[in-house]
Image (tube, coloured by chain):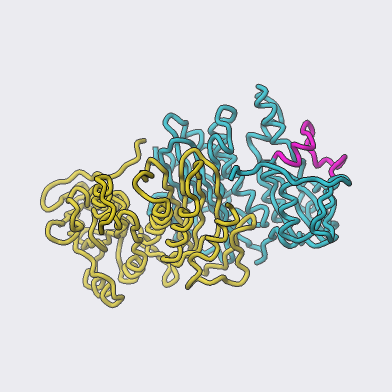
Chain colours: A yellow, B cyan
């Protein structure tokens, strides 16, 4: 199995990211990556069976895809470009390893992010831990959560709540539906993150736990208030409820703050990207949390402890 | 818990590895590391409760320590210097998180390897997945497993089998014993790996699964035979059996091949390190596996699939 997995992963994501001289991939004690020539952006994210995914509802390939995309989404939220990934998996007896690995490889291909290290263990329950490394190849400064200022305009890269709505449909027995697909195969907004950084975004966060909770986290880190305007903007996905958008999570859209909204819109247009959706603005009072004119409590998916 | 863990980890390992300008640690979507100015060596390693550790026999702090040291040992085996680490943990209900994190932090301190990213999830069983990043700050070439040639002398950085013997004693009820300590708190041979690389070692591997199996792996990757000489050399730890040395694992000593044994011994002496223990030599026949003159079957700890 180990050799098969190494073979399946060793060329994944290499399109557009060929081997550099001196690079060492999977198979030695460690991998060796060519000098990144700049800062390195790193993040780790784990998917646990029964906690983050219901294995009765999703395919092993979807778990692999989503595990890598969720980690890459953290790079997107910094405006970083994917570089390399490492994956540690715990595999329960009888779990289908090959489709899981195929899902990881497909996501690595889609993001042009080769998997250069792996660890495969037996385990009582499934876990997939993904570490991603990114670069800031056209400027040294990442976009953090903490840079938003009062008056900054807020945008989101796409409609939210689709993943939660897809999960609801899937739980009700639906298999073949656009929103089920959104839940199964989310896409990290990597190009959008790069463009937003170049266009001067002051703060970003990805919607992993819900638009309300993640926008709140960004506001908290930045010390600003929030006046979100969502009704009628398209920020709630067709077929999703406002609650699913605000607290569902796993949409992996980016919330962006900017003092130059026209520059952001022009940057997206010039890159041929879907126009970002206006989401309101940041305010001076750090305690303010308004949604369509009414106070809201940030909620979303949280760990039990 | 998350904030407490972040606080416990954010300064661990910073002694000797202070924050660089522009670095971002735990707390944002991703961490940002200053330009490493050279290649980056990366590895991931997971410890799973009930598979790699018997939680009835080891303390949570030992699990954290060993998880980080095992990953760092892969850097040592490349001759890389520890740079930064990321940790993803799955924590079962009622498991003591704080001692686990204290063990991680203690190992990060000991290795001067700050933890810059973390993910903490609930889980049905314990797992600790550690990704380590290293640098090759005094030369671009790592030491791989595959560079040993026929005639190269073999050495090991220290006696093996101590960890397996310590586990045996611990299972029999012993708590306070030198070998139990060796099992609980192994030390990655980081300085030794750096010195061996500078002294021209042609191949290295760390003893994670047993001296016999890991030396075999190095020989296999290098396409050479092995004539190991262990009897009377001190390569078997006092109190351990030869089987425990050959197949026990978790010693994290380094097996080194070199065409310049005097240079290696001088390098270790100049660095004030314990002299490496002679282990025999590499031979031309890639199928040869001799231990003290008799054929041996490489064995050691293996995954079930």
Q: Is residue B246 magenta?
A: yes
The secondary structure that dominates the magenta segment is loop
Q: Position of residue B252 (x, y in %)?
A: 68, 45
Is A84 located above or below residue A285 in the figure?
Answer: below
Query: Which quarter of the rendering shows the C terminus of chain A?
Result: top left
Task: Please name the residue shown 48% across and 49% down the image.
Answer: A96
Q: Is A206 on the left-hand or right-hand side of A2?
A: left
Q: Which span is picked out in magenta?
A: B230-248
Q: Give the vertical position of A296 relative to A140 (above or below).
A: above
Total numbered badges shown on the rendered structure:
0
Q: Position of residue A231 (x, y in %)?
A: 12, 56
Q: Is residue B202 above or below residue B27?
A: below
User: Residue at horizontal 48%, vertical 66%?
Assistant: A13
Place of residue B117 in the rendered image (x, y in percent of width and height, measured from the top left): 46, 50
Camera-side residue: B246 or A208?
Answer: B246
Farthest residue, direction bottom: A270
Q: Is residue A76 magenta?
A: no
Front-most of B293 and A70? B293
Give whichever of B70, A38 is nearer the camera: B70
Please give left or right for residue A50 compared with residue A120 in the image.
Answer: left
Q: Is residue A199 left or right of residue A14?
A: left
Res A219 seen here? no
Q: Quadrant of residue A303?
A: top left
Q: Does residue B87 show up?
A: yes
Query: Measured from the top left, where is residue B262 in percent x and y?
Result: 85, 57
Q: Which sits in the foreground, B106 or A155?
A: A155
């Amino acid at each position: 199995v180990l050799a098969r997995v190494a073979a399946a992963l060793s060329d994944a994501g290499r399109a557009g990211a060929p081997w550099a001289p001196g690079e060492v991939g999977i198979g030695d004690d460690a991998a060796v990556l060519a000098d990144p020539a700049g800062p390195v952006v790193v993040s780790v994210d784990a998917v646990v069976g029964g906690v983050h995914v219901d294995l009765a509802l999703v395919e092993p390939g979807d778990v692999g895809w989503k595990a890598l995309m969720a980690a890459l989404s953290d790079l997107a939220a910094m405006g970083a470009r994917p570089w390399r990934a490492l994956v540690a998996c715990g595999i329960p007896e009888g779990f289908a390893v090959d489709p899981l690995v195929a899902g990881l490889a497909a996501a690595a291909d889609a993001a042009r992010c080769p998997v250069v290290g792996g660890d495969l263990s037996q385990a009582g329950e499934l876990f997939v831990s993904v570490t991603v490394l990114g670069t800031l190849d056209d400027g040294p400064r990442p976009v953090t959560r903490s840079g938003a200022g009062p008056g900054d305009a807020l945008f989101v890269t796409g409609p939210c709540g689709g993943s939660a709505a897809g999960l609801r449909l899937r739980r009700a027995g639906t298999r073949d539906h656009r929103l089920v697909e959104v839940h199964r195969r989310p896409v990290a907004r990597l190009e959008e993150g790069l463009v937003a950084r170049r266009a001067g975004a002051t703060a970003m966060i990805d919607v992993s736990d819900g638009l309300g909770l993640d926008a709140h986290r960004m506001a908290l880190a930045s010390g600003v208030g929030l006046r979100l305007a969502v009704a009628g903007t398209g920020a709630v996905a067709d077929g999703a409820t406002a609650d699913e958008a605000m607290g569902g999570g796993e949409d992996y859209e980016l919330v962006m703050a900017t003092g130059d909204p026209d520059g952001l819109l022009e940057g997206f247009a010039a890159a041929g990207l879907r126009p970002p959706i206006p989401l309101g603005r940041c305010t001076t009072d750090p305690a303010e949390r308004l949604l369509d004119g009414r106070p809201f409590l940030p909620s979303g998916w949280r760990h039990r402890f």
